[in-house]
C-alpha cells in the first residue's frame, strides 16, 4: 500500500512529541525511513555533490567528455536535491510548532526542550535522506563555483565535444546569464548562433528563477500597454519572491561562521553567549536574503527596495487596468512598508471615495506580507540589540523601509548614514561623490603642458598632460618592459587577464629592483622607472591641489600585445569599462564603494610610452558603461589622470596590432594604505652598488626563471587592477 506524505507527517509528529522506547522505537524509525524512501525516486541516500563535482572536473582535464557530462549533471541534480532535502527538514521541524506543543516545564527548560527536539527532528530527517558526507558543509570554493554556475561552463565544452549542440547551448547560456562579462563565453554564444538548425528556444536558462521570469514578463506587458497581463505577472512575481525569500531564510541555520578576528581554539564564551552569537548570525543571514533575492543573475547589486517596489508596480498596473480591488490591496500592502507614503495614501482615499466605500476594511493588505514585515522588524530589533549590547559586528540594514523607532538611539546616527543612499530612489543611481580635489593647480615640471582639460574631456577631475617623458626615456622604459616584464598579470599567472585576444606583460617596481640587484637589468633603467613615477606624483599633487600629500597605492609598467590571427571580428575591449575604487553596475548605473574594489584609491594615472600600435585608446564613459564621453590616444610622454571613483568610468579599446605599453599608477590620501612594496623597492635601489660604465659592461641575459617570485619571496599579495 502506498504511503502518503500526510501519513509520514502524522507518525513523525507522534514520534517527535511522544518518543517510543525499545523495540517500538526501532520499528518507528525503520518505518519512517522506509516510508521516506517510497516518496523519492530512489531509496539511496543523497551523496555529497562536491565530490561529484571534483570528479567531473578531473574528467574534464582528462578529456573524458561522456564522464564529464554524467558527473556534472549528477552533481547539479544532487546539489538541488540536497538543498530541497535540507529545506524540507527545516520546514518540517519548525521551532515555533515544537515549542508550542512542548509540555510545560520550569525556568528556561521550555526553550531548551524545544531546541533539543528540533535538533533531534533535523538530525533524524537529514540522516534519513543524506549520506554523512552530504550532511557536512561543502567547501567555500565549491559553493562559490555553484553560485557562479561554473559547472555549466565545463558542461558546455563537454556537450560541444560530443556534438550535442542543443545541450551545449543551454549550458553555455545558463552560465552566460550569470556571467555576462565573460568574454570567452560571449564569443562562444556568438558562434553557437551561427550553427544551422539551432533555434532560439535552445538558448534556455536552466537555472531560471521564477520571480525573475515573472518580472521580465511584467515589464514586457507594460511596454505593450497590456496592464491586465502586467498585473498578473506582478502578482506572480510577488508570490515567487516571497517563496524565494522563505527558501533563502530556511538555509541560514548552518554552522557558526568564525570571523577572521575570532580564535575558535580559545573561544571561552559560555552557553548563553555562544548561543546568542550564533542566533544573531542566523538573523543577519535571514535579513541578507532580501538582497540575495533582489539580485538578478549577472548583476553586481540588488534592485533597491525590491519587495515594496513590486507592490508599487502592481498598484500602477491594476490602476491602469481599472481593477479597483487589486489596486487597493496593492496600495494597502505597500502601506505596510511605507505607512506615510503621501501619494499612495491620497490615491487610496480618492479611489475609496469614488466607489462610495468609506469603510477601508472592505479590502485588506496581504496577510502573508503583514506577517513577513512583522517578523522582519522583530529580527531587526534583536540584531540592533546584539550590536548595542553583545558586541555583535555592525549590522547593515538592507531595507530602506525600516522605521527609525526600531533602531536604538545610540545606533541611529550610524544607521542613518547607512540608509543615506536610499534617499535617491528617483534618480536611479547614487549621488555623485564630492571630490576633495580641485583641478587647475600649478605645473611644477618644466616642459609639461595641459593638452586636454576636464571641459574638453566632457567630465570633471580629468586631465591630459604632455611632455612628461622624452623619446629616449620612452625607449628605455620600453626596452625595460620587454626585457624584464613577466608574461601574464604577474600575480596569478593569467597571460590574458582581460581578453583572450591579447597577451599581457607586467613589471612592478619591486620586481625591477630585485632583477637589478641580480644584475639582470641596468641600474639606470630602474632609476628612470622610479623617477618617472615620482614625477607623476609631484605633478598630480600640485595640479589637483591635493589637500594632503599623495601616497603611491600601486604602480605597474604594463604592455598589451595583440595576438596575430585572433583580431578578426573582435567586439571586446582590451580592458572592460570599470571604475578604480568602486564596483560599477552598468545596468543600475550605480558604483558600489565596497570590497573587492580598491576603495582606498583616490587618483588614477596612465603614463604612455608609445603609439606604434593600432587601437588601444583610453575611453571615458557614462555610468552605463556604453556611452563614450571622451577618448584619449596614447603617445610617448602623455599622461592622463583622473579621480578614481564613479565620476570616471573608463576602459581601453582593443589593441588590434602591435604592442601598447604604459606605466599605470594609483594614488591614495591615506598614508596607512601607501604601497609597502614601493618602500621595499626604494630601499633595495638605495642599497645597489654603483653601476660600472655602460660602455664597459654588457647587459646580462635575463635569468631563465622570471616567474612570480624572486629569491623565494612573493612579490605581492592578492590581485591588482590595471589600466
Image: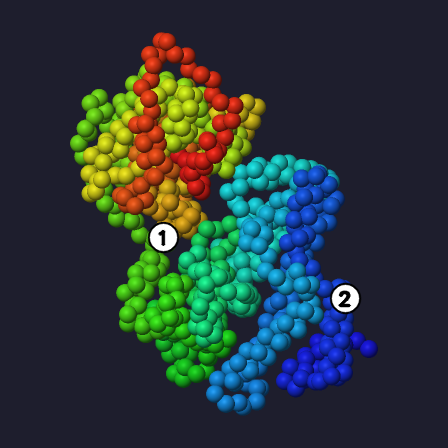
Judged from the image, the secondary structure of the residue bearing numbered disc 1 is: loop
The local crowd at label 2, few if under 14, some if 14 to 19, many if 20 or more residues have their Cα within 10 Å, is some
Q: Where residue 610 sits in the image (x, y, percent)?
A: 38, 21
Residue 36 appears in the rendering: yes
Q: Where residue 460 sits in the image (x, y, percent)?
A: 27, 40
* 587 up-or-down from 119: above or below: above
Q: Where residue 471 sits in the image (x, y, percent)?
A: 32, 17
**Front in this rendered view, residue 399 or 16:** 16
- The residue wearing badge 2 is 43
**Front in this rendered view, residue 686 or 459:** 686
Quarter-wise, where is residue 457 in the image? Answer: top left
**Front in this rendered view, residue 309 or 723:** 723
The local crowd at label 1, few if under 14, some if 14 to 19, many if 20 or more residues have their Cα within 10 Å, is some
- Split into 4 quadrants, where in the image is the N terminus? bottom right
- The residue wearing badge 1 is 429
Give the side of residue 93 with respect to residue 659, left or right: right
- Pointers 2 and 1 in contact (C-beta within 8 Å): no
Residue drawn at x 37%, y 9% as measured from the top left: 696
The Cα–Cα distance between marks 2 and 1, rounded to whole angstroms, is 52 Å
* 539 up-or-down from 601: above or below: above
Q: How many marks?
A: 2
Residue drawn at x 42%, y 38% as measured from the top left: 716
Residue 646 appears in the rendering: no
Return the residue found at the far right. Answer: 1
Residue drawn at x 37%, y 63% as measured from the top left: 394
Amino acid at each position: 500500500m502506498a504511503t502518503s506524505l500526510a501519513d509520514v507527517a502524522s507518525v513523525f509528529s507522534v514520534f517527535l512529541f511522544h518518543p517510543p522506547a525499545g523495540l517500538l522505537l526501532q520499528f518507528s524509525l525503520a518505518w519512517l525511513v522506509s516510508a521516506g524512501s517510497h516518496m523519492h525516486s530512489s531509496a539511496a541516500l543523497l551523496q555529497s555533490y562536491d565530490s561529484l563535482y571534483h570528479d567531473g572536473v578531473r574528467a574534464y582535464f582528462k578529456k573524458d567528455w561522456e564522464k564529464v557530462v554524467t558527473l556534472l549533471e549528477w552533481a547539479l541534480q544532487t546539489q538541488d536535491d540536497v538543498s530541497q532535502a535540507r529545506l524540507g527538514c527545516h520546514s518540517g521541524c519548525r521551532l515555533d510548532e515544537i515549542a508550542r506543543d512542548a509540555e510545560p516545564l520550569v525556568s528556561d527548560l521550555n526553550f531548551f526542550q524545544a531546541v533539543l527536539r528540533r535538533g533531534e527532528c533535523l538530525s533524524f530527517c537529514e540522516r534519513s535522506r543524506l549520506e554523512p558526507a552530504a550532511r557536512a558543509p561543502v567547501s567555500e570554493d565549491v559553493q562559490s563555483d555553484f553560485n557562479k554556475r561554473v559547472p555549466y561552463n565545463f558542461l558546455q565544452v563537454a556537450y560541444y565535444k560530443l556534438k550535442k549542440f542543443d545541450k551545449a547551448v543551454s549550458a553555455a547560456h545558463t552560465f552566460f546569464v550569470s556571467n555576462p562579462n565573460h568574454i570567452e563565453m560571449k564569443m562562444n554564444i556568438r558562434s553557437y548562433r551561427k550553427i544551422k538548425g539551432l533555434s532560439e528556444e535552445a538558448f534556455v536558462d536552466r537555472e531560471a528563477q521564477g520571480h525573475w521570469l515573472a518580472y521580465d514578463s511584467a515589464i514586457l506587458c507594460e511596454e505593450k500597454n497590456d496592464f491586465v497581463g502586467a498585473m498578473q505577472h506582478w502578482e506572480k512575481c510577488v508570490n515567487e519572491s516571497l517563496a524565494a525569500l522563505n527558501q533563502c531564510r530556511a538555509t541560514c541555520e548552518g554552522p557558526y561562521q568564525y570571523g577572521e578576528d575570532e580564535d575558535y581554539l580559545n573561544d571561552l564564551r559560555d552557553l548563553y553567549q555562544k548561543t546568542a552569537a550564533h542566533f544573531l548570525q542566523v538573523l543577519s543571514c535571514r535579513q541578507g536574503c532580501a538582497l540575495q533575492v533582489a539580485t538578478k543573475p549577472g548583476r553586481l547589486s540588488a534592485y533597491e527596495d525590491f519587495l515594496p517596489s513590486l507592490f508599487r508596480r502592481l498598484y500602477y498596473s491594476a490602476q491602469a487596468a481599472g481593477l479597483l480591488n487589486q489596486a487597493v490591496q496593492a496600495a494597502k500592502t505597500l502601506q505596510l512598508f511605507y505607512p506615510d507614503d503621501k501619494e499612495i495614501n491620497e490615491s487610496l482615499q480618492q479611489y475609496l471615495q469614488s466607489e462610495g466605500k468609506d469603510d477601508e476594511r472592505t479590502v485588506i493588505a496581504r496577510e502573508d506580507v503583514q506577517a513577513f514585515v512583522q517578523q522582519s522588524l522583530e529580527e531587526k530589533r534583536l540584531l540592533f540589540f546584539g550590536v548595542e549590547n553583545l558586541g555583535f559586528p555592525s549590522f547593515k540594514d538592507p531595507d530602506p523601509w525600516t522605521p527609525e523607532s526600531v533602531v536604538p538611539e545610540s545606533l541611529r546616527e550610524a544607521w542613518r548614514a547607512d540608509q543615506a543612499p536610499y534617499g535617491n530612489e528617483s534618480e536611479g543611481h547614487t549621488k555623485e561623490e564630492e571630490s576633495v580635489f580641485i583641478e587647475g593647480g600649478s605645473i611644477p615640471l618644466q616642459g609639461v603642458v595641459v593638452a586636454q582639460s576636464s571641459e574638453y574631456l566632457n567630465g570633471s577631475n580629468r586631465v591630459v598632460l604632455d611632455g612628461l617623458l622624452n623619446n629616449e626615456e620612452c625607449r628605455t622604459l620600453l626596452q625595460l618592459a620587454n626585457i624584464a616584464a613577466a608574461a601574464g598579470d604577474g600575480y596569478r599567472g593569467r597571460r590574458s587577464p582581460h581578453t583572450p585576444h591579447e597577451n599581457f606583460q607586467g613589471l612592478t617596481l619591486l620586481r625591477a629592483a630585485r632583477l637589478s640587484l641580480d644584475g639582470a637589468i641596468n641600474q639606470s633603467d630602474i632609476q628612470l622607472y622610479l623617477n618617472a613615477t615620482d614625477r607623476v606624483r609631484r605633478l598630480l599633487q600640485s595640479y589637483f591641489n591635493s589637500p594632503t600629500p599623495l601616497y603611491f597605492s600601486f604602480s605597474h609598467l604594463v604592455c598589451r600585445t595583440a595576438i596575430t590571427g585572433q583580431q578578426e571580428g573582435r567586439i571586446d575591449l582590451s580592458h572592460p569599462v570599470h571604475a578604480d575604487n568602486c564596483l560599477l553596475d552598468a545596468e543600475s548605473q550605480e558604483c558600489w564603494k565596497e570590497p573587492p574594489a580598491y576603495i582606498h584609491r583616490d587618483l588614477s594615472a596612465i603614463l604612455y610610452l608609445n603609439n606604434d600600435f593600432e587601437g588601444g585608446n583610453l575611453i571615458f564613459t557614462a555610468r552605463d558603461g556604453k556611452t563614450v564621453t571622451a577618448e584619449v590616444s596614447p603617445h610617448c610622454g602623455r599622461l592622463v589622470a583622473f579621480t578614481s571613483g564613479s565620476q570616471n568610468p573608463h576602459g581601453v579599446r582593443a589593441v588590434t596590432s602591435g604592442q601598447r605599453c604604459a606605466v599605470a599608477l594609483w594614488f591614495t590620501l591615506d598614508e596607512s594604505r601607501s604601497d609597502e612594496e614601493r618602500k621595499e623597492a626604494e630601499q633595495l635601489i638605495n642599497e645597489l652598488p654603483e653601476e660600472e660604465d655602460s660602455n664597459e659592461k654588457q647587459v646580462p641575459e635575463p635569468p631563465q626563471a622570471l616567474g612570480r617570485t624572486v629569491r623565494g619571496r612573493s612579490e605581492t599579495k592578492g590581485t591588482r587592477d590595471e589600466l
